[in-house]
Amino acid sequence: MSDELRPRSIRSKKLSTIARHGRLRRSNPFVTVAKVLAASLAVLLVSGASVAAIATYDVAASVQDGVPLANEAESAEFEIDAIPGGVNLLVVGSDSRKGQDASFGPVDSTGDLNDVTMLLHISEDHTNASVISFPRDMYVPIPECPDPAGGTFDSMDSQKINTTLTYGGLACTVLTVEKLTGLSIPYAAEVQFSGVMAMSTAVGGVPVCVAEDIEDEYTNTYLPAGMHTLEGLEALQFLRTRHGVGDGSDLTRISNQQVFLSSLVRTVKSASTLSDPIKVYSLAKAVTANMNLSTSLNDVSTLASIAVALKDIDLSKVVFAQVPTGLVEGGVIPSQPDFDDLFAAVAADDSLQLAAAPTAEDPTAEDPAAAPDPSAETDPAATPAPDPAATPPAAVLSDSVKGQTAGDVTCSAGRSLEDQ
């Protein structure tokens, strides 16, 4: 990666921000349909449905050897039906340079850390889903983990969660999150830099909204306020940037990733993607060729059946959330009882509802006059009351749980070099 800085001499006008996301003026209708995934997650699953649709030998042949987990589900037979019951799937993003482009640095320049750790949960009745992020600097207990080379690693009382991949591989990260949340996680996937780049390129780029200029010399990311369609290296660096967003912390980086992922979800589910055989094929190939999957997930039929389970979930019922944490020296720890309450709601299959969800801003809507007039009178009889029996239980989370739904079109809150 080049160290040369190319700050922009003319900076765009600063725009107001909301919560941890930025807010940009409304312009024209944006795409509003989607499915779940995440810098790996969203694409991993939705493209699975595409795999089922095309089921080519080339895609199936690109599936790599799986990683055995301590608690695995059996692979599904090949079919296009939704997987029965609920799903817990852990996706980790590794910072390893092994097998990556030389521009990311020498192979031994970093360890193999899970700098991104996200849990996808699909409810048993397939009416809601959540993608929950764990900060990389969160101190957690690590249980005994199998050593990939043989034997067992001892448990540890308190280590940062992003060391688990180095400690005992993907299986150890899964065991740690299971112990932390009380959930059984039978599926897992690890994605590296090349995988994120390939998936963003496969969909033809991901549109993101930037409320204030993003300037980050560490990832060489310079984006002026406005709309940008990111793919390849640009998309990866947008997800990696920390110094260029919010307050420069890993917590605001997670918020920035949610902006990207919610847009990725809409892009993948849009007609322009699913009706394009080349994009469908490219997505399927990007997933199977660029991810290290658990053996339970390591075939196209399982990927497809999980994707189909997500297919009809409304965007408002797909929630991206960051676990609640409190600051300690050198990192963060789970904030109780809010942390346990969050995962109790997940275990109960409740539809998660954020207490302080960001205002959904449509950055392509140009006519503010087209918005409903809040002062206008409405006829109560014109809107039938919802049927409680048809509405799944909802759990209103503490306002310490930050996030957004896949239907919220939000903007990244940028940070300039002069503010760093």
Image (tube, rainbow, N blue to C red):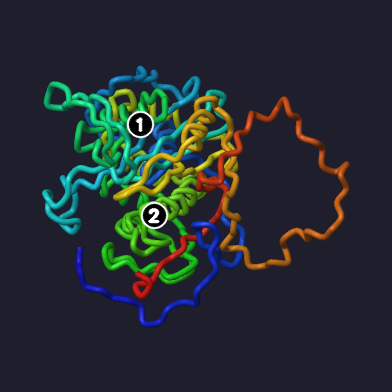
Judge by depth and name the residue closer to the eye, 278 or 183.
183
Quadrant for residue 70, please give it: top left
Residue 288 position in % (x across, y down): 30, 36
Is residue 43 in view? Answer: no
Judge by depth and name the residue closer to the eye, 343 or 307.
343
Mark 1 surroundings: few (<14), some (14-19) or many (≥20) residues within 10 A: many
Residue 6 position in % (x across, y down): 28, 75
Q: Quadrant of the N terminus?
A: bottom left
Seen in the picture, residue 159 relative to 358 is either above or below; the reply is above
Q: Secondary structure at mark 1?
A: helix
The residue that mark 1 highlights is 177
Seen in the picture, residue 229 relative to 198 is either above or below; the reply is below
- Amino acid of disc 2: Arg
Judge by depth and name the residue closer to the eye, 68 or 167.
167
Q: Residue at x 25, y 23 (%)?
A: 68
Q: Earlier in the sequence, mark 2 or mark 1?
A: 1
Q: Residue at x 76, y 34 (%)?
A: 386
Judge by depth and name the residue closer to the eye, 72 or 293.
72
Mark 2 surroundings: few (<14), some (14-19) or many (≥20) residues within 10 A: many
Residue 227 position in % (x across, y down): 48, 65
Pick out the residue farthest to the bottom.
Answer: 9
Residue 163 position in % (x across, y down): 24, 40
Q: Residue at x 48, y 51 (%)?
A: 263
Judged left or right of residue 112, residue 23 is right
Judged left or right of residue 215, residue 150 is left
Quadrant for residue 283, please give it: top left
Measured Cα–Cα span from mark 2 to mark 1: 20 Å
Is residue 118 in view? Answer: yes
The residue that mark 2 highlights is 253
Q: Are the residues at dot 2 and dot 1 in contact (C-beta closer than 8 Å)?
A: no
- Amino acid of disc 1: Val
